[in-house]
């Protein structure tokens, strides 16, 4: 596979996998998020209805006390209009909430049950109030003394009133508590999501770096092998060949071309021994040529060359000088001669360039 295509395929595959994981995580998060938000949103109209009912029973209680203080029938009729307006306002709120339940906007059964119970209590309070209003109007219209009956109904109304207020308050408190729990869960889920997203990005970058490193090794390994084989070839082993790498076509083509060059050079060297020496000489590394040229120039000037001279003239360490001289000696380009504590370096007849 060509290098460009391999890089593109690997990158696209990696990005697609990462994108799919991100989408799955995001989808899961938003699904739970929407679920919790819907529960919170469902509670809002219920809370509004509870607040309205609570306000309505308080207003009705005040209105009832004012109504019972009326002294004539016409004055009582005026209060009837206010009661009717209050009931219509409350009925609209109840109708709106029932519509939301029917449409499925409010679907939590616990919320629906709580609202149903509160609605029944509200109607009970209104029913007790209406009985008192009718009895009081009867008393005004007939001048009968209905105080005992009114007091009994007033006690009943008071009991229902307190029960309704307590129930409405409990429902509101419970819904508020549940909403706080849901909001805490939402906040926790959001933090978990962003932490997980951050972790995924870090993992993505780490894996990407490892993938780049792995891919670079795929490139470096055959290149390093080619360099080693070329060094061996330059050192005179013309039979050496590079094992072809099939992973990347560009490198495989380069290896094939180098092997072809090696084969041609080997064929020429085997066919003409004199050419072999010339080829080997031309393939010498510059660091070895520097040593030969130094000794050669000194010889032309009728000067001897020692190991110390080579080390100082080429500004290299003693081990490096020994290593280079050893290779040249093995190839037959120089000879060593003892000279006191040092050694003389002389060129052989093989050096004719």
Image (cartoon, rainbow, N blue to C red):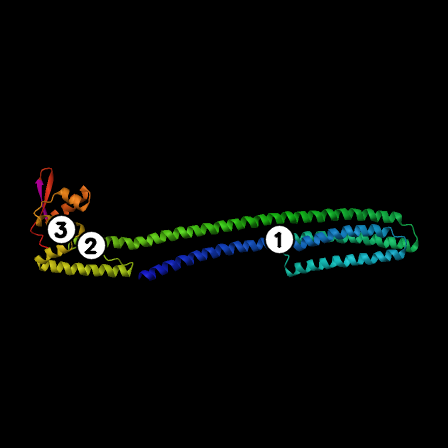
Tell me the chief SS of the magenta region: strand
Q: Name the residue under label 3.
A: 293
Nearest the viewer among 347 and 230 is: 347
Report if the CB atoms under discs 3 and 1 are less than 8 Å apart. no
- Name the residue beneath numbered marker 1: 40
Residue assigned mark 2: 230
User: Quick one: SS at disc 3?
Assistant: helix
Dot 2 falls on a residue whose secondary structure is helix
Q: What element carries label 1?
A: helix
- Badge 3 or badge 2: first in the primary sequence: 2
Q: Position of residue 162 (x, y in %)?
A: 76, 46
Q: Viewed as shown, does residue 242 lie left or right of 73?
A: left
Name which quarter of the figure residue 322 lies in.
top left
1 vs 317: above or below: below
In the current view of this chain or complex, which residue is farthest to the front? 301
Residue 332 vs residue 245, the one in the foreground: 332
The image quadrant of residue 41 is bottom right
10 Å neighbourhood of mark 1: few (<14), some, or many (≥20)? some
Direction from residue 245 to residue 195 in the image, left or right: right
Q: Which of marks 3 and 1 is in front?
A: 3
Q: Is residue 337 magenta?
A: yes
């Amino acid at each position: 596979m060509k290098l460009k295509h391999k890089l593109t395929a690997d990158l696209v595959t990696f990005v697609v996998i990462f994108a799919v994981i991100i989408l799955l995580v995001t989808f899961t998060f938003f699904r739970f998020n929407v679920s919790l938000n819907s529960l919170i949103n469902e509670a809002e109209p219920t809370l509004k209805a509870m607040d309205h009912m609570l306000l309505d029973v308080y207003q009705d209680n005040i209105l009832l006390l004012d109504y019972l203080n009326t002294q004539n029938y016409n004055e009582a009729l005026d209060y009837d209009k206010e009661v009717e307006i209050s009931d219509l306002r409350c009925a609209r709120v109840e109708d709106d909430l029932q519509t939301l339940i029917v449409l499925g906007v409010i679907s939590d059964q616990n919320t629906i049950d709580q609202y149903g119970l509160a609605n029944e209590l509200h109607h009970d309070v209104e029913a007790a109030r209406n009985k008192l209003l009718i009895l009081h109007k009867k008393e005004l219209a007939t001048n009968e003394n209905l105080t005992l009956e009114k007091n009994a109904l007033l006690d009943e109304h008071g009991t229902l009133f307190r029960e309704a207020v307590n129930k409405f308050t409990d429902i509101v408190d419970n819904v508020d508590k549940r909403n706080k729990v849901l909001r805490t869960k939402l906040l926790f889920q959001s933090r978990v999501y962003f932490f997980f997203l951050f972790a995924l990005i870090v993992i993505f970058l780490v894996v990407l770096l490892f993938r780049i490193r792995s891919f670079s090794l795929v490139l470096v390994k055959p290149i390093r092998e080619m360099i080693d084989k070329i060094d061996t070839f330059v050192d005179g082993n013309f039979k050496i060949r590079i094992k072809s790498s099939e992973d990347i076509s560009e490198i495989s083509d380069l290896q094939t071309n180098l092997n072809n060059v090696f084969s041609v050079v080997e064929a020429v060297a085997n066919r003409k021994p004199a050419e072999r020496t010339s080829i080997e000489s031309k393939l010498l590394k510059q660091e070895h040529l520097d040593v030969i040229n130094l000794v050669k120039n000194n010889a032309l000037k009728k000067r001897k060359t020692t190991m110390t001279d080579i080390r100082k003239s080429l500004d290299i360490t003693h081990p490096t000088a020994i290593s280079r001289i050893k290779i040249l000696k093995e190839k037959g380009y120089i000879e060593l001669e003892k000279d006191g504590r040092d050694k003389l370096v002389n060129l052989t007849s093989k050096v004719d360039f």
